[in-house]
């Protein structure tokens, strides 16, 4: 299929994890890379929408304090994680460090950035506390992030 994640066997992955999902070299030579930042086990658990929404806002804002190569941080429709899109190639350990630093910022945030009717299409659908709990849960399993599949060779 044309969409990379539709070719991923979601029954073989083990969340939480970080995974290189796609790499594109654009006609002018620029490279963009997409990472799968999976918070919950597909088809077993999910993040509630206000949690996802607040993580999206806070991560999108705070990640740019750590890297000028962040293009986007987008929620997955299945509500199990996000896509982090970066400019240029990166070692996965660098990406993990960026995710860790940003999620640590989420845990200490005092507000969800742009969580209002002027700057957001659904400003009432946020929970800083929920985003912080999800960030802490993900951070607590940092040593598992680079193991994507439950079975070797899957």
Image: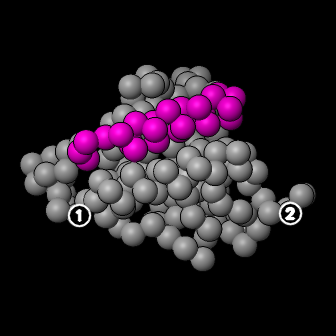
All told, the count of numbered labels is 2
Q: CA distance from mark 1 to mark 2?
A: 37 Å
User: At x 35% / y 67%, what residue is drawn?
Assistant: 49
Nearer to us in this view, 108 or 113: 108
Q: Where residue 26 sits in the image (x, y, percent)?
A: 56, 31
Pick the front one: 73 or 59 = 59
Depicted 97 relative to depicted 52: above or below: above
Q: Is residue 95 above or below residue 149?
A: above
Q: Which residues are magenta?
A: 90-112
User: Does the segment drawn in magenta span residue 51?
Assistant: no
Label 1 neighbour load within 10 Å: few <14, some 14-19, many 20+: some
Name the residue at 17% across, 62% down.
124
Q: Position of residue 7 (x, y in %)?
A: 70, 64
Report x, y in % for residue 94: 63, 28
- Residue corresponding to mark 2: 151
Percent x, y for residue 134?
46, 57
The residue lying at 58 percent from left, 26 percent from top is 88
Q: Main secondary structure of the magenta part?
A: helix
Residue occupying the far left of the picture: 118
Magenta-drawn stretch contains 100: yes
* Dot 1 or dot 2, earlier in sequence: 1
Taking 130 as reference, is 136 left or right?
A: right
On the rendered image, what quadrant is the C terminus found in? bottom right
109 vs 12, left or right, is left
Whether residue 29 appears in this view of the structure is yes
**Callout 1: helix, strand or loop?**
loop
**Can residue 19 be seen?**
no
Name the residue that disc number 1 marks: 125
Mark 2 surroundings: few (<14), some (14-19) or many (≥20) residues within 10 A: few
Q: Residue at x 78, y 59 (%)?
A: 149
């Amino acid at each position: 299929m044309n969409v990379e994640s539709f070719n991923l066997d979601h029954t073989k992955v083990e969340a939480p994890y970080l995974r290189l999902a796609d790499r594109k070299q654009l006609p002018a030579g620029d490279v963009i890379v997409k990472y799968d930042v999976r918070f919950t086990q597909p088809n077993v658990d999910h993040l509630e929408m206000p949690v996802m929404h607040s993580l999206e806002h806070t991560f999108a804002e705070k990640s740019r304090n750590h890297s000028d190569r962040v293009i986007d941080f987008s929620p997955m429709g299945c509500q199990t994680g996000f896509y982090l899109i970066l400019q240029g190639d990166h070692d996965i350990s660098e990406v993990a460090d960026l995710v860790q630093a940003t999620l640590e910022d989420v845990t200490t945030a005092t507000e969800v950035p742009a969580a209002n009717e002027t700057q957001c299409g659904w400003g009432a659908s946020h929970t800083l506390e929920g985003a912080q709990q999800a960030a802490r849960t993900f951070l607590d399993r940092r040593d598992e992030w680079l193991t994507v599949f439950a079975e070797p060779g899957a």
